[in-house]
Image (tube, rainbow, N blue to C red):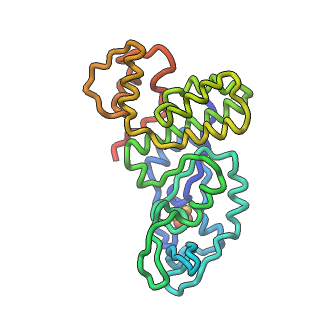
């Protein structure tokens, strides 16, 4: 395997004692399985703000201007979220291949409840730190540990992480981008056919930060819902008979990986570095 992808992660998912209630939330599959194939960059945005452990619980509230902010539930004190985060985010820029957040946190969570000042829930928003990761680190795959419980989501997240890592290594090594695109053709196609075809049409002319940014954007797109049909069509175009009554993209991919059907060009299914199916 080449260079390991670098993933940002909420520190508490690695078992660090940083939570407001001091309950440990170590995610054993991430630590024991995924941890053998990636490098972690753990960060607790609340500890980085100088808050103690334990500390009072906080939630997201919308202020009079509609802006969300982190507020201590007991006394309504607003927590200034802008100290120390910019420095950390600047250190992450251009280095991370993905981010795994702890769900339901007003700092790290994705789509957590937002309250009005009277304590009524008035919608949902990403946590204050998760929002800044997305706005300041460009296109990187993100998820939380609840999303990782879904097989397709887990597959998509980690495939995107390894694609991004391989893309960055490829570009750093000064190799032609066209070669990388051909290697990952099917994974790109299963995200956005039009963009993939435009990039392929540019052929050897592919180069430059702008094109890399477009490829990064495609990598982070969701998988097409008709992914299984797209792959079956691709098999047929290559003269590969798919006799299986397969309706799931992941099942078809696993049949192709098992070597039952031999693919001849643009490996339809790139090997995955670890067992993304897990018994949990
Ligand atoms: S969810 Fe985020 S802020 Fe809360 S303890 Fe974990 S890393 Fe820290």
- Name above or below for residue 38 compared with residue 92: above
Please indicate whether residue 162 sits to the left or right of residue 93 in the image. left
Q: Quadrant of the N terminus?
A: top right
Q: In terms of depth relative to the viewer, which is nearer, 168 or 210?
A: 210
Q: Nearer the viewer, residue 278 or 223?
A: 223
Would you place residue 51 above or below residue 245 in this image? below
Residue drawn 59% across and 42% down? 217
One can see residue 76 in this view: yes
- What residue appears at the point 32 percent right and 34 percent down from the top-left corner? 248
User: Residue 131, located in which quarter of the rendered image?
Assistant: bottom right
Image spot of residue 157 (x, y percent)? 49, 43
Q: Is residue 38 left or right of residue 84?
A: left
Q: Residue at x 37, y 17 (%)?
A: 236
The reply to whether residue 18 is visible in this rendering is: no
Residue 116 drawn above or below residue 145: below
- Point out residue 122 in the picture as x, y percentages from the top left corner: 44, 74
Rendered location of residue 70, percent (x, y): 56, 74
Give the residue drawn at x 72%, y 28%: 173
Depth check, front residue: 172 or 277: 172
Residue 146 horizontal side relative to residue 69, left or right: left
- Report whether 212 appears left or right of 73: right
Number of callouts in the render?
A: 0
Q: Is residue 251 above or below residue 87?
A: above
Q: Residue furthest left?
A: 245
Q: Quadrant of ligand 1?
A: bottom right
Residue 234 quadrant: top left
Residue 55, image x, y percentages = 54, 77
């Amino acid at each position: 395997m080449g260079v390991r992808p670098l993933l940002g992660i909420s520190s508490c998912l690695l078992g660090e004692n940083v939570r407001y209630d001091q309950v440990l939330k170590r995610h054993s599959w991430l630590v024991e399985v995924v941890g053998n194939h990636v490098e972690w960059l753990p960060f607790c945005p609340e500890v980085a703000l100088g808050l103690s452990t334990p500390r009072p619980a906080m939630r997201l509230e919308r202020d009079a201007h509609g802006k969300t902010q982190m507020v201590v539930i007991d006394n309504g004190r607003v927590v200034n979220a802008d100290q120390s985060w910019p420095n950390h985010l600047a250190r992450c820029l251009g280095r991370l291949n993905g981010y795994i957040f702890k769900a339901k946190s007003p700092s790290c969570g994705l789509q957590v409840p937002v309250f009005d000042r009277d304590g009524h829930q008035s919608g949902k928003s990403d946590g204050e730190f998760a929002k800044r990761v997305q706005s300041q680190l460009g296109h990187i795959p993100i998820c939380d540990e609840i999303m990782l419980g879904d097989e397709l989501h887990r597959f998509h997240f980690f495939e995107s992480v390894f694609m991004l890592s391989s893309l960055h290594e490829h570009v750093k090594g000064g190799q032609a981008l066209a070669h990388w695109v051909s290697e990952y053709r099917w994974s790109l196609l299963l995200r956005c056919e039009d963009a993939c075809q435009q990039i392929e049409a540019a052929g050897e002319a592919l180069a430059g930060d702008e094109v890399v940014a477009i490829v990064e954007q495609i990598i982070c797109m969701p998988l097409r819902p008709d992914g299984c049909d797209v792959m079956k069509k691709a098999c047929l175009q290559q003269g590969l008979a798919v006799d299986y009554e397969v309706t799931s993209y992941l099942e078809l991919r696993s049949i192709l990986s098992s070597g039952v059907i031999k693919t001849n060009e643009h490996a339809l299914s790139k090997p995955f570095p670890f067992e993304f199916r897990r018994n949990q």
